[in-house]
Image: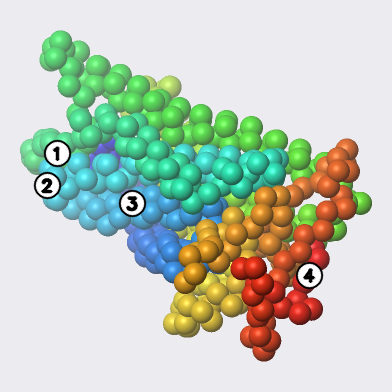
Amino acid sequence: MDSNVSDFYSNATENYNSEFSVYSMTFIFQQVVLAIVCCVGLLGNTLVIYVVLKFSKMQTVTNMYIVNLAIADECFLIGVPFIIVTSIKKSWIFGGVMCKAYMILTSINQYASSIFLFIMSADRYVAVCHPISSPKWRTPIISRIVSLCAWICSITLISPILIYSTETEQRNGRNGLNVTAKTCQIVWSTDNSTEENFEEQTLSMAAMFILYTFVFSFAIPLCLISVFYCLVIQKLRNVGPKNKSKEKRRSHRKVTNLVLTVVTVYVLCWLPYWILQLAMIASQKEPSHFVVTLNLLASCLSYSNSAVNPILYAFLSDNFKKSFLKACTCAAGKEINATLQLENSVFPRKSKLGTDKFRPSRATSICPTNGEDCDVGLLVSKTDASTSKTNVTFTTENKTKDTIVRNGIPSTPNSATNL
């Protein structure tokens, strides 16, 4: 977020105290909203992580990326109490170590969130546009490797913050008195600078860092996400209505719409913040009270993005909704799994015999109820009739019938279903 946390909020508070009460009310409103966002966001994202890791049917490739996104959001929300206390005390009181930790946790979210949204968009592209080859790439091992690379990339991109963030002391004149206040900020070392041009070089380095953050944490990922979703939307429009029922085409769009909605909300929450940051760089003037007010509201909106994602999952995904409700009622894991719909790319579980419990074949659907949350495998385009007559057969478990095992393949009389 801001490279100088305590200095920005203390100056804002001081300016508000000398102005009309509207500014003071805006500042108080922001603190209240930040406190609500912190509580709701930490609770919601923790619940997302719990239900995905706890229940086997929730462990899809897309959901595992959502878990990493939730972890990044929690890193961002952990810094909210530091912001609230600093704005009230008008000084950083947590020490140098916590200053660096705060800067790292807050900054890594900006990169990790955009990177995982890009990965989720790329995953949707592979699942929708390349359904036959997608099972080879959408596997547990590859998803873990991709997630690890995303975190390493995020840490690499915030290396300037690792090096230059520190706690400093500044003297502010208030009512004719010199008051020393500690600040948590990024101090750019300029070895060749003199006292005359030190401030100018510092402002120049800060502007360059804001542009650096904007390009790598927002602009580039957003462009790549747009490219992938243009291809996905084009593919979905070419799905042949004669070869696929409306229910199956709608189920394909369900997971894609979830990811697209999360991306859209992310852009809407962060775009005002970046517009104001770039505008302040371009103006090169001391921000007015109106601009400071807008910046406070924009930063509050950016923080709210980390809390709104679990709410989106609950409204847009039936499986997440059921998992949240069952987890809150402390229901048993088996009972919850029984109510969930089996989605494509579920991570296979090893049974007692050493075989995979769920192992969908390539380009097949494992959506017995044609539920909207099912991530159906194969899409048939209007110009491709080679797979229009494919029938996929699978067996379902029935507790009231005995399962016959022949040649290692379980089968139940009259249990075959054609999709």
Q: Nearer the viewer, residue 151 or 365?
A: 365
Give the foreground label among 3 and 4.
4
Residue farthest toward the front in the current orientation of the protein? 407
Q: Three-letter amino acid code at disc 3?
A: Cys
* Marks 1,2: beta carbons within 8 A: yes
Kindly tell me whether residue 360 is visible in this rendering. yes
Determine which residue is flagged by label 2. Answer: 95
Q: Nearer the viewer, residue 185 or 162?
A: 162
User: Could you say which disc has been placed on residue 75 in the image?
Assistant: 3
Determine which residue is flagged by label 4. Answer: 417
Q: x, y percentage for residue 35?
A: 35, 61
Mark closest to the chain's N terminus, 4 or 1: 1
User: Could you say which disc has been placed on residue 406 in the image?
Assistant: none
The residues bearing labels 3 and 4 have C-alpha atoms spaced at a distance of 45 Å
* Marks 4,1: beta carbons within 8 A: no
Q: Three-letter amino acid code at disc 2?
A: Gly
Relative to residue 188, is residue 336 drawn left or right?
right
Please report the residue visible at 43 percent of the width from the left and 64 percent of the height from the top.
Answer: 53
The residues bearing labels 2 and 3 have C-alpha atoms spaced at a distance of 19 Å
The residues bearing labels 1 and 2 have C-alpha atoms spaced at a distance of 7 Å
Q: x, y percentage for residue 114?
A: 47, 40
User: Could you say which disc has been placed on residue 167 in the image?
Assistant: 1
Kindly tell me whether residue 28 is visible in this rendering. no
